[in-house]
Image: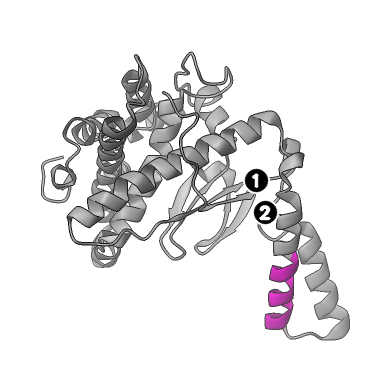
Amino acid sequence: MLWKGRRESDNVEDRRGGGGAKAGGISIVGLVVAFVAWKFFGADPQQTYQATKQLTNQTQSQQADPTALTAEQKEDGAFVRTVLADTEDTWIPIFQQNSMQYKQPKLVMFSGVVNSGCGSAESAMGPFYCPADQTVYIDTEFFKDMRTQMGITGDSNSSAKEAGDFAKAYVIAHEVGHHVQNLLGISSQVQRARQQSSKVQGNQLSVRQELQADCLAGVWANHNQQRTNFLQQGDVEVAMDAAHKIGDDYLQKRSTGQVVPDSFTHGSSQQRMQWFQTGLKTGDINRCDTFNSTI
Ligand SMILES: [Zn+2]
């Protein structure tokens, strides 16, 4: 996958610590200060929290010093900024063609733990999109986990320790797909429907929502290919390998040896590959109606 030399997005905030240091979220320093202030000065907890937040932000901006990042982190940062810009340059015109305006999401790169509009989150949960603050969160170390822990294929261009570039791009495009769903009002509809349904029905809605995000990631890849001709030999196979290895059945089988379809929340390997490919082949968002299709 070709990505160097294209525009990088300004909508990325880098909260990573250098050399594997853990930054982001409420730092241990912030917590100690808040506790001391509360205990000894009888400070109002709300004010203390605000003060903590300010302090945390300061800590974060200090730790986001680009000189503190390793060469690999810098490369990952440039990659993430480029792919996010690619999604902006795809979704802005698609929304325009449908007489809508694309509000660009933010993306936060973090290390270890992060404070989001959806609460605090750990890297172990994987990359995620928070609808409340319209932000994608990603610990770029996940690119390594994809290869070393999930066994997702690398490619000749990607770092030997990471999954292939197009597999990494697919992950970002999938999260941006959730942002598109949010802008279209699909996320809130799903949330309302889930509140009125059983656990199994709720899981099925979740699967349809996730498969749609996969399809939208495919739509992005189709349009980005037309615009930049970025795909190289073997890239589609790399993304398919990723879609396969993040399928619920694959992950369940790997961790427990059993497959329980009712508990699926993201879809099977077959479904994930199929819907990503539908978007990739057609480039048509209307083909991504996973809610009214047989999945
Ligand atoms: Zn998802």
Q: Nearer the viewer, mark 2 or mark 1?
A: 2
277 on left or right of 118? left
Q: Which numbered disc, 2 or 1, marks the residue that appears first in the sequence?
A: 2
Comparing 203 with 242, the one in front is 242
Q: Position of residue 101 (x, y in %)?
A: 28, 62
The image's mark for residue 61 is none
- Find disc 2 in the rendering and name its residue: 24
The image's mark for residue 112 is 1
Q: Disc 2 on helix, strand or loop?
A: loop
Label 1 environment density (alpha carbons within 10 Å; few <14, some 14–19, many ≥20): many
Q: Position of residue 253 (x, y in %)?
A: 38, 27
Q: Position of residue 94 (x, y in %)?
A: 23, 50
Q: Does residue 47 show up magenta in the picture?
A: yes
At 27% across and 29% down in the image, what residue appears?
A: 273
Q: Disc 1 on helix, strand or loop?
A: loop
Work out whether 61 lies above or below 214: below
At 44% across and 18% down in the image, what residue appears?
A: 153
Give the residue furthest to the right: 40
Comparing 247 with 84, the one in front is 84
- Residue type at mark 1 is Gly
Q: Is residue 26 visible?
A: yes
Q: State which region is magenta.
A: 45-55
Q: Position of residue 287 (x, y in %)?
A: 14, 42
User: Which quarter of the figure has residue 226?
Assistant: top left
At 53% across and 26% down in the image, what residue appears?
A: 149
Comparing 78 with 114, the one in front is 78
User: Which quarter of the figure has residue 185?
Assistant: bottom left
Find out whether the residues at labels 2 and 1 contact each other: C-beta distance under 8 Å. yes
Q: Quadrant of the N terminus?
A: top left
